[in-house]
Image: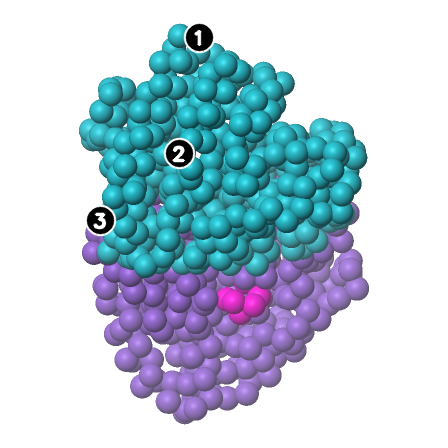
Chain colours: A cyan, B purple
Amino acid sequence: MTFEIQHTDPNSNARAGKITTDHGVIETPIFMPVGTVASVKAVHFHELKEDIKAQIILGNTYHLYLRPGIDTLERAGGLHKFNGWDKPILTDSGGYQVFSLSGNRKLKEEGATFRSHIDGSKHLFTPENVVDIQRIIGADIIMAFDECTPGTADFAYAKKSMELTHRWLERGLNRFDQTEPKYGYSQTYFPIVQGCVYPELRRQSAEFIASQHREGYAIGGLAVGEPTEIMYEMIEVVNEILPKDKPRYLMGVGTPQNILEAIERGVDMFDCVMPTRNGRNGMLFTSQGIMNMKNEKWKNDFSPLDEFGTSYVDKAYSKAYLRHLFISKEYLALQIASIHNLAFYLWLVGEARSHIQAGDFSSWKRGMVEQLGRRL
Amino acid sequence: MTFEIQHTDPNSNARAGKITTDHGVIETPIFMPVGTVASVKAVHFHELKEDIKAQIILGNTYHLYLRPGIDTLERAGGLHKFNGWDKPILTDSGGYQVFSLSGNRKLKEEGATFRSHIDGSKHLFTPENVVDIQRIIGADIIMAFDECTPGTADFAYAKKSMELTHRWLERGLNRFDQTEPKYGYSQTYFPIVQGCVYPELRRQSAEFIASQHREGYAIGGLAVGEPTEIMYEMIEVVNEILPKDKPRYLMGVGTPQNILEAIERGVDMFDCVMPTRNGRNGMLFTSQGIMNMKNEKWKNDFSPLDEFGTSYVDKAYSKAYLRHLFISKEYLALQIASIHNLAFYLWLVGEARSHIQAGDFSSWKRGMVEQLGRRL
């Protein structure tokens, strides 16, 4: 994997770049749709590629490990072959889901034991075996196994947690460096900065992580309960230390506004379930603001879903029709909303990139952040 | 609306024809996907048109009347404008849903009172107002309001029910003939033959219905609990009487085998929820037989979903992947299965048409019926 910075914004830390993987090029800043269980919910892959214009998607190691399981993924020749997505894939390490979804989880030095949220079966994730699992999944970008410290943790817990994450990182990197990709294309390994809301810990973590000299770095443990301003501050603290010439991935963030603020602070990659999950609940993000599609006000509004939208659904369906589908609990509602929101997120990071290239990112961002927050 | 018979099978009553409406041509025999509440569940309209190759879809008056409601449909300029489907639409009269879905229904000479299955509100359908409603929906083909007699009714009940349906027909036709289409294109009105499983009643009903001299005729009250052989016998009885030069629509039927048998007996039009509903439960119809996609046997079968299938999903996704989506309860499973099954149904009636044109329908049908019944 290589990364090339193509433009930097004169008035901020925003950058436009290009990641090259064996499954193709990713233009940054980029948003990665979340394909939890080998599918981006309610979206066909050709829609992801041709309409939404996704360049990379995310898979969840925890979910894929449980279903379809590593044996099936290995027989398929990896996740790309299994679901037919032939562009880059990034997999998280499963740590976040172990703590948020599974039952009876126990953290030990060795790793984390947990019970499947599906059938209660008992499993162990270690820094080493999540490398092995991601090798088998065949992710282009493999994430380190970390403890995602809650945003409300006290300093002592956050420090202990960060130190564990660092020890796990060394073990994971050892395993990664001693093993080979299984399917003939390169894989790379991103370490994750933790440190909760404490600048001192974030700095320590960023320094430790940067000293590993890897091809990219992630910032984890944000947007997990802390105030937004603290999240932005932590990004600033960390990005002062992370090498400028490598991509920076802010995990699990966030709203369109969060993404623009983070781009301004030098982040290159994002993922979040918000466009699909909120979309399934009837919330549409647009360049003009947010629409709640279940609202009575759209009942007889036959104008196109989003006149400024870039997806075909924005012109093919009206606001009144989508409202009707939500009120009638039709599957098509989920499909249309998911496509729209993902296409909007991809449009937004593409626009950010264009404005970085044009040199007017910061002023564009100010106006856009204001628009994005409106309720339509 | 016009109907032209293009070919008749030398060895059976099967015919290939062409229905011309103001929204375009329908080549018969044809299957009509069911778009219950203004959407064919889990399927985009461009997929219906371009991939599935649907030529006409069905809407349910009962559902559309309750949601989005007649006021919204009228403001939209009719259902075609509301959901963007610009090819022909047929609407049922709502009678079937009143009896199968709604609560507290009461049959009177005037019509049927019922309570909405959604909010319990009280409504009245009459032969006249369901014409008005279908005028507002803007269906190309409007169905008469009838009582769908249960397949298990005794002769006395079936006779009384049929006579009510006949009186309702005259009232409905009066209203239809005294009113105009609302949106500038033609609408036509199909009477419905009832008579349960009693040849004598079916004959009486077909004669009464045929004497109305309409542009098409429907056969109702079949596949509602009676043995399949009785259904085929009733179709034969009725089609001996219905005029040969008008399209015949067998309502709510059925399996792929049912459809071929009915085509052989001179039926031209079909609708059924089976391809979508069974599809959502994991049952796939193929030219080689039936597949239960939740079956363990597909777990590691990475071959294309249906190597003989005509939809893009048949090549884009594997059996193992679709099984995984069903097991993981992913929305994409419902989407893929619905598209596949509808494309298969449309392929099947298209093949039937080709074989009628080629003159070898009956022998092709025999082999196909055998294949269709297999469990893969």
Residue highlighted by disc 2:
A212
Instruction: Report x, y in % for residue A306.
Output: 72, 46
Residue highlighted by disc 3:
A71
The answer to which of marks 3 and 2 sits earlier in the sequence is 3
Was residue B320 drawn as part of the magenta stretch in this picture? Answer: no
For residue B244, which numbered disc appears in the image? none
Instruction: Report x, y in % for residue A186.
Output: 37, 53
Instruction: Tell me the kind of residue under disc 3.
Output: Asp
- Check disc 1: other Cα within 10 Å, few if <14, some if 14-19, many if 20+: few
Q: Which residues are the magenta region? A: B48-53
Could one spot residue A240 in this view of the protein? yes
Label 3: chain letter: A
Label 2: chain letter: A
Instruction: Report x, y in % for residue A277.
Output: 52, 35
- Check disc 2: other Cα within 10 Å, few if <14, some if 14-19, many if 20+: some
Main secondary structure type of the part rendered in magenta: helix
Instruction: Report x, y in % for residue A236.
Output: 60, 24
Label 1: chain letter: A
User: Is disc 2 on the same chain as disc 1?
Assistant: yes
CA gap, disc 1 to disc 3? 40 Å
Residue A250, above or below A71: above
Residue highlighted by disc 1:
A154
Could one spot residue A280 in this view of the protein? no
Left/right of residue A318 with respect to residue B44 in the rendered view: right
The answer to which of marks 1 and 2 sits earlier in the sequence is 1
CA gap, disc 1 to disc 2? 27 Å
